[in-house]
Amino acid sequence: MHNDICSPTFAYFVNKVIYHMQNYTIPRFVMLFFSTLIVLSQGAFAQKLVNLDDIEILENRIQVPLSESTRSLDIISKAEIMSYPVQSVSELLQYMGGADIRRRGPNGTQADINFRGSTFEQVLVLINGVKIIDPQTSHHVLNLPLDMDIIERIEIIKGPAGRIYGQGAFAGAVNIITKNPKNNSFHAETTVGDFGLFGGKLGGSYKTKKWNHYASYGYEKVEPGYRPFADYMRHQAFLQSEYKMKNGNLQILGSYVHNGFGANSFYASPFDSSSFEQVNTGFLSVKSEHSIGKSTKIRPAIYARYNTDEYTLVREDPSIFQNNHQSLVAGFQVDGSTVVSKNGALGYGVNFRNDRLESNNLGDRTRNVFTGNLEYKLYLWDEKIKIVPGTSFNYYSDFGAYTLYGLDASFSLTKNLAVFGNTGTTYRIPSYTELYYEDRSNLGNPDLKPEEAFNYEAGLKYINKVYFLQASYFNRAGTNIIDWVQTPVQVDTMLVNKWKPGNITDLPIQGVDLSAVIQVGKLSFLRPLRTLRFSYTFIDGNAIQLPNETSRYALEHINHQINIASQWSILKTLKFSTGYRFIDRVTMDPYHVWDFGFVAHYKKFRVTAQINNAFNTEYAEFPRVPMPGRWAQFNVRYQWSK
């Protein structure tokens, strides 16, 4: 139906890339810096490195090594996580190609995640394979009650993952894997910085023969902030316990985060200059893994996420306007895999959950959701060909049933080089905010239809113990895409323009995604450069929408994105990291941002210095919400372990 729109020739697409690049020149200092890093990494082929091609992707059912993946992926290791100059998962994801993190404040205050031209409602976040669902709005799914110290790695699926995880992964998914320390430990730390930043944290682990526990508490505040009403205060408590069983393991994770922040110009500029928002999130999951014989693994889990969101338009006088929302998502899931032959494995799973919302604005809402997944991984031609067909059945008590289909495949050209591709359908139902929200500037639409898309991707992947290189072309043909647009609304006897969501557009998205990770440091102990990461993403969107309408989200995607990150080990006790981001977004001015981090170790102490936006760039990731200029932060940590 959309072939004439969504599938232009490859020559046309290449011309579009060249046209866009001719209209923007990358600064010389960026090219010089990148060239320097490449020179430092020369000779990398001389020695071997471990880990990169041994990483196993922890999808909920069939788990495969990274080298056998049939999708476009990024993996952030624990070593990288600890070296980046960041304070939150949302800031960490900024360095990943294809991921568009749009923040309204620093240090995880409030951020949206988008993939390959999607909106923030179209990306799924998971913790250890358990979905983080918020039926109110996805504005707060990155309000994660997680301690970054125990994140083992982060798996990023770029592109629709509905067949794997269900409807939430319309344009991509982020799966955060946690793991407790392996010994008894204790740590205490304090943080100070510009704009009145102050914080502290206590944590530790305790290990017995069968149990392994980790707990922490952290506090952080900024007052007065980098601009008027940009203050915030955060409390966070975290507990994770693991129990080793004879034929498996049990994991219990419980966490809570209180996040209160000034919301100046976040949602209703210019009326909300002194607004304040308080978001409290609690999360609990109990998950286990059991081996049945030599061929079957079963992974049951129960989970619950409780979230409150209190928004005050004028903090000096809350009676003017307030929103109070409380949501509870609870459910259980069972995933499993069975090796059925020498060349094939079957993956299967079911998930049932209940979504509840109590709100003074959105009303009291409830829905039941059932998801069933089935997939089969087939190896052919001496395992050079891998084919994974799969389906996901989704039933919503208020929207009915929908079935997703997909097919992934890869062909190994050599031991390290493979061509891969995937295709399939994806789907998303509207959030309760899109359906029912109402205030002086916005009006929900209860007649919204679910979004749908057909997707395909093709690419090349090279991986060994040192290098992970990936290039892909992607295309997502979206229909009934939901966006908020300025719409005349009858209020008493007057017509007033309000932001109102509608299925206003068919949105073909296509692009190219290039990424490289080089673990230089393990090639030669004489070289200070340890890890180099580079990515480039180009997105071409061509929305077909109604005339005279102004988009709020769907048409503000990235055209060009460049990320360069590096980790250095200058001395045995001194580490240095850099992060560079270039963003050229539709409807907004392009910008460059540099971040730097320094870590020094002395016996049981670690001192960290972090400088974000080091060259004081003026930029915004949302209209009318400027981001901070240069921001320095310092952290001192005492660590004891046994």
Image (tube, rainbow, N blue to C red):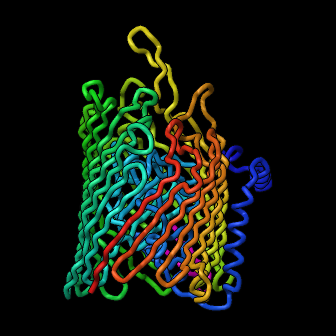
Q: Is residue 459 left or right of 118 when viewed as pictured?
A: right
Q: Does 491 appear above or below 471?
A: above
The outermost residue toward the top is 493
Q: Give percent across and percent down for residue 248.
A: 27, 82
Picture coordinates of residue 479, whole percent (x, y): 56, 42
Instruction: Please report the bounds of the magenta region as a residue range.
Output: 376-389
Q: Residue furthest bottom?
A: 47
Closest to the observer: 238 or 542? 238
Query: Where is the C terminus found, in terms of image quarters?
Result: bottom left
Q: Is residue 308 placed above or below 58 in the rendered structure? A: above
Magenta residue check for 320: no
Nearer to me, 167 or 462: 462
Residue at the image point whose x is 35% and y is 49% from the top: 222
Identify the image quadrant of the N terminus.
top right
Q: Nearer the viewer, residue 13 or 632?
A: 632
Residue at 66 percent of width and 52 percent of height: 560
Where is 78 relative to 235, above or below? below
Residue 277 appears left or right of 564: left
As for residue 384 lying within the magenta part, the answer is yes
Give the quadrant of residue 507.
Answer: top right
For residue 565, side relative to residue 30 (left or right) = left
* Magenta stretch: helix, strand or loop mostly: strand
Residue 234, position as x, y percentages in the image: 30, 52
Q: Does residue 196 appear left or right of residue 558 in this picture?
A: left
Examine the rendering and report whether any part of residue 354 can be seen.
no
**Residue at 28% in and 57% down:** 219
**Residue 445, how many percent across, how many down?**
41, 30
* Observer able to see residue 548: yes
